[in-house]
Every structure is written in structure tokens, then in C-alpha cells.
Amino acid sequence: MLAQPAALLAPTTRSEFPDPNRAPADGLLARSDEMGTERLIDAYSHGIFPWFDRDDRQVLWWSPNPRAVIKPARLRISRSLAKRLRSRCYEVTADRAFAETVAGCAAPRRNQQGTWITPRMAKAYAGLYQIGLAHSVEVWRNDALVGGIYGVSLGRMFFGESMFSRARDASKVALAHLAAQLAAWRFTLIDCQMMTDHLRSLGAAPIPRGQFLRLVAANRQAPTLQGPWRLRAPPAECSPSPPSRWEQQRGASNGTR
């Protein structure tokens, strides 16, 4: 329990969040009756994100300590995921089906009651998508959406919100393509908010909130890639594997090159 209730923000277009360094370890910093576009941008640019589970309640704003992050170039690709990427069994796109990706993330999951991606939350991120600040990476199989990830991009940081999978490794494939493109654009971090075993297996690491907030402050000076994204830097694992020594010898014996 908090010693003091979270600060109530005034209903203004320009928000004034309390210093997130002063939030308790769980990160609950403030509450508000609305979550307009300007407030969302202000929140993310200061290392704060909304998280609540019912539209008939106030919006809760968080900045937990520690913070889980992934460096795009250091995403951990397992052998099975590398094999999946090489197989090219999925088509991967960006910003083609943002609303559908959010809906996929909001759908009920096993061993989970309800969802925190409420209609109000989805509408708010749709507003960020319309102005080119929220993005999605979609994974398709036979023209059906089977996985994806979405989040907010400011400066050279990507603030991940959620991902989903309806086919084996589909969400991991989305993250791998996202990380590869972000690395090519020289993004510094993918914010994962709070650490889980799943994120740790993908290379996420916790850093102190103070360090994260300093990185976010520096990021406010970086230009934002606003507008629709296109994926032009696939993961290295998508490249065909070089032939093995056995295959090279077999080719030579058959007179092939």
C-alpha cells in the first residue's frame, strides 16, 4: 500500500506529472480522469505510461523501479527462433493493421482474467497512430494476422506496449523484425516496462529507474521518426544460411557451383 495517494492530475491539455523519481518502487505516480494525446506524449517523454483495467475508473500512471529494457542490437535469438526466421513461413509488415494488432493484444488469453487494453486505451493509442507516433509490426500467415507488437516511438526509443501470438513464435518474429529495424535506425532502447521471465529470455535486463529516466531525458533531444514505418532491415537470421561443408563437397562432386 502507498503511504500517500497518487497525485490527481488536472484536466488540462498540458499535463504536469510529479517527478517520477519520487514514485514508490511499484511505480504508481499519478491518476487522472482523461488520457488525451498530448498527455500521453508528455508521459512517454518522461518515462511514464498508463495502466488500468476498467474504463469506468481513473487512469493510473506508472514509472516502476527497476525498468525492463532491451537494446535492439542485443535481442536474444534462440536457435529455434533463428530457424523460424530462416524458414520465412510468415510475412512481416509494419503499420499495415494497427487497430487489428491492438485488438489481438487485447483478446483474452489463457490463465488471464480480463485485459488492461480497454476500448478507451485502444482509442487513445489509435490517436497516436493517426499522428505517426504509435506503430505496429504485424505477422501474417496465409493473409491472416497471427501475431504482432505495438508501441510508441519518440526520439530514438521505442516504448513497447504489448504483443500477441496466435501461431508458434509469431510474437517473437514480430519483435525480432522490430529490433532489427530499430538497430538499423540506431535506436538506443526498447522499453519493456516491467520484467518478466519471458522478456528476460529475449534479452531484456532491468536497469534502475533513475538511469532509465536520464536516458529518457537525453532522448527528448533526438529527432522522432514520425509517420508510417516500413521494414527494410530484416533480422540477420532471415538470410539464407551458408552451405555446410558436406553440401559444398556434394556440390563439387556433382559438378555444381
Image (spheres, rainbow, N blue to C red):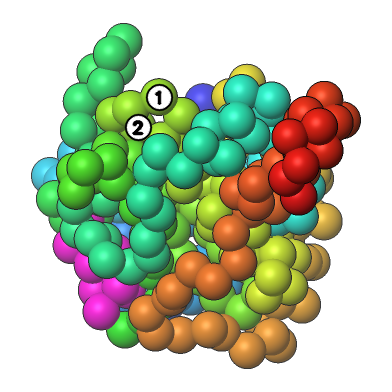
Q: Kindly identify the amino acid type of the residue bearing the numbered disc 1.
A: Arg
Q: Is residue 81 above or below residue 66?
A: above
Q: Is residue 114 above or below residue 112?
A: below
- Name the foreground residue: 196 vs 81: 81
Q: Kindly identify the amino acid type of the residue bearing the numbered disc 2.
A: Ser
Q: Position of residue 220 (x, y in %)?
A: 66, 81
Q: Secondary structure at mark 2?
A: strand
Q: Is 31 in the magenta?
A: no
Residue range highlighted in magenta: 122-130
Residue located 12% across and 44% down the image: 56
Q: Is 127 in the magenta?
A: yes
- Name the foreground residue: 178 vs 211: 178
Q: Secondary structure at mark 1?
A: loop
Q: Position of residue 59 (x, y in %)?
A: 30, 52
| Other-residue count near label 1 (Cα within 10 Å), few / some / many at <14 / 14–19 / ≥20 | few
| Other-residue count near label 2 (Cα within 10 Å), few / some / many at <14 / 14–19 / ≥20 | many
Residue located 46% across and 29% down the image: 169
Residue occupied by mark 1: 168
Looking at the rendering, which quadrant does residue 243 occupy?
top right
Q: CA distance from mark 1 to mark 2?
A: 7 Å
- Name the foreground residue: 76 vs 237: 237
Answer with left or right where residue 176 lies relative to residue 210.
left
Residue located 69% across and 27% down the image: 78
Residue occupied by mark 2: 165
Q: Position of residue 75 (x, y in %)?
A: 71, 44
Answer with left or right where residue 178 lies relative to residue 220.
left
Give the label on residue 231, or none.
Answer: none
Q: Position of residue 42 (x, y in %)?
A: 48, 75
Main secondary structure found in the magenta portion? helix
Answer with left or right where residue 242 lies relative to residue 224.
right
Residue located 19% across and 48% down the image: 143
